[in-house]
Amino acid sequence: NAGVMQNPRHLVRRRGQEARLRCSPMKGHSHVYWYRQLPEEGLKFMVYLQKENIIDESGMPKERFSAEFPKEGPSILRIQQVVRGDSAAYFCASSPSGTNGNTIYFGEGSWLTVV
Amino acid sequence: AQSVTQLGSHVSVSEGALVLLRCNYSSSVPPYLFWYVQYPNQGLQLLLKYTTGATLVKGINGFEAEFKKSETSFHLTKPSAHMSDAAEYFCAVSGYNQGGKLIFGQGTELSVKP
């Protein structure tokens, strides 16, 4: 049973370009979460999605960032007009449901470097 | 609102010594508490979690943690450290109706000396 799959694992973008990070949840999981880990910091919650729905986006920056989880295909975190401060590791996680205290399973992460 | 504080960003122990990583939380609702481990350039792996019931929780790799409501703590322990335990450890909290939305502490880097 494959785990949470993220790609690309490493991405380099120039300032002003767009970054797209993809996440395929574990089989049978319909809930996806995105977290960001800045250097020397813990993980910060960004967004929580179900298929075709954004459940909680309280951690998303107000501009340039968006996320989707379509009916078919992976979840995508999109960062427009990247800046150096966007350089970070972005982790996707998934769970089979939104049950209280649910365990969420993390992918290996996507490391974004903005030059 | 919820928050997590991990005391000590770096902890160093000798191989075979007790491991104690501290975590205190703040939550306005009954908390669900987690410990995750992260090895370099990898994702997070669940060590253990507390939801309800027994306050002493046993996890993988010989780790355990005890939920103490009166102290708002969920410290992680292991009786005897192994070299392979060297990693970053994160404590996290979630609450009712939050699904998998976790609030993480800053992390504690554990070093194990031979």
Image: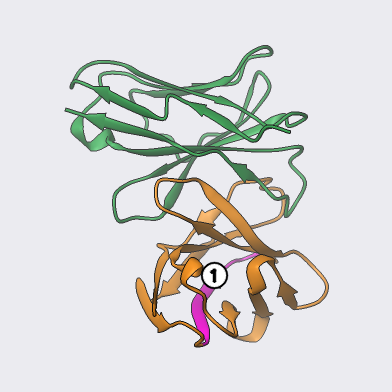
Chain colours: A green, B orange
Q: Position of residue A69 (x, y in %)?
A: 60, 20
Residue appearing at x 52%, y 79% in the figure:
B81
Give the amino acid type for the residue marked by disc 1 in the picture.
Ser
Image location of residue A55, percent across then percent down = 63, 32
Q: Residue reaching furthest front?
A: B114
In what quadrant of the picture does the N terminus of chain B appear?
bottom right
Residue drawn at x 72%, y 55% as measured from the top left: A101
Q: Which residues are magenta?
A: B18-29
Q: Is residue A24 left or right of residue B11?
A: right
- Relative vertical location of residue B93 with respect to residue B111 in this rendering, above or below: above
Residue at coordinates 59% horizontally, 80% vertically from top-left?
A: B78
Task: Determine whether B82 is above or below B106 in the image.
Answer: below
Q: Residues within 10 Å of mark 1 (few under 14, many from 20)?
A: some
Image height check: is A78 above or below A38?
above
- Identify which residue, B95 or A1, lies in the foreground: A1
Q: Secondary structure at mark 1?
A: strand
Q: How many marks?
A: 1
Q: Chain of mark 1?
A: B
Q: Residue farthest to the top?
A: A72
Q: Is residue B32 magenta?
A: no
x then y, percent, for residue B92: 55, 60
- Name the residue at 73% across, 50% down: A102
Identify the image quadrant of the C terminus of chain B. Answer: bottom left
Q: Which residue is mark 1?
A: B26
Q: Nearer the viewer, residue A111 or B111?
A: B111
Q: Position of residue B50 (x, y in %)?
A: 71, 67
Q: Quadrant of residue A86?
A: top left
